[in-house]
Amino acid sequence: MEGFRIGIIGGTGGMGKWFADFARRAGCEVEVSGRSSGKSPEAMAASCDVVCVAVPISATVPLIERVGPRMPEPSLLMDLTSLKVGPVAAMLRSSRCEVVGCHPLFGPRETSAAGQNVVLCPARSQRWLPRIRALFAEAGANVVETTAERHDAAMAVIQGMNHLHTVEMALLLEASGLDLGDLDAFSTPVFREKTEILARVLKNNPRLYAEIICGNPAVPSLLESCRKSLDALCETVRSGDAEWLGRRMESLADKLWPGRRQPR
């Protein structure tokens, strides 16, 4: 990527800032714009070889529709959003340039991409895909290429339902009437780990997590399946059938981790 100019819209905070710092270390010339600083998105589209949209999910598609028509055909338009179907479709629809969706599967607190997973969704790209892949791979990231649809289906579980379970746990704690501080003396290591996750989700940009949950169209059907499973579990617990529940847990372990008694 050395010698190319990357413009990052939303590059003054969060993953946009992380990507700006990352690209600079890789030898790229980087321009950033934020809400009140830097070039306008339209000017950046006209002057940069690569434009990366790194704004909140709800603002991503409208911003893509602003900059897409300004992008020259040899350039690349990409995004860092946690959802891919909508943004990738918007990039294809509003531009004639190359298009790659990108989702780094980690947060801006990480200082390095080494060992981290990065998903690329190439939609219209020949020249730029190898360069973006190399940008992350040379930094030690695990780069996976897939479609926007497959990405969002996976994220419905990995992010959407995962974060919903965290919110559900917080709601249960609230309904219990118990003070979280009073539970410290009774806490197991596993419970402490869960409450640490609760704090990260609820106190660190909860609106981002809400957009990830509500913006993925695959989440509602999974949530309905979860509701049915929970109803069945309620009946099992009410009946006191620990034998059946134990067998069901063993069968789940065998299916999810075949050949191993527990995950690593």
Image: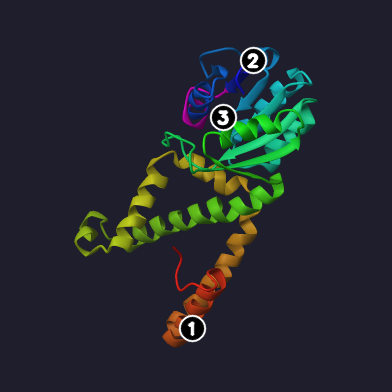
**Is 247 in front, or is 127?**
127
Q: Residue at x 73, y 24 (%)?
A: 68
What range is drawn magenta here? 9-17
User: Which residue corresponds to mark 2?
Assistant: 44
Mark 2 or mark 3: which comes first in sequence? 2
Q: Does the magenta run of residues contain 11?
A: yes
Q: Can residue 79 be seen in the rendering of this structure?
A: no
Most foreground residue, 208 or 47: 47
Q: Earlier in the sequence, mark 2 or mark 1?
A: 2
| Mark 2 and mark 1: Cα distance apart in space | 59 Å
Which residue is identified by label 3?
Answer: 55
Residue 72: image location, x then y, percent: 77, 18
User: 219 or 114: nearer the eye?
Assistant: 114
The residue lying at 49 percent from left, 43 percent from top is: 115
Report the quarter where the C terminus lies: bottom left
Where residue 186 appears, as percent x and y from the top left, is 22, 64
Quarter-of-image position of residue 173:
bottom left
Q: Are marks 2 and 1 in contact (CB under 8 Å)?
A: no
The quadrant of the rendering that contains the N terminus is: top right
Alpha-carbon distance for marks 3 and 1? 46 Å
Give the residue pinned by disc 1. 247
For the residues labelled 2 and 3, the Cα–Cα distance comes to 15 Å
Task: Indicate whether residue 242 is drawn in magenta.
Answer: no
Q: In this view, does 101 lie to the left or right of 202?
A: right
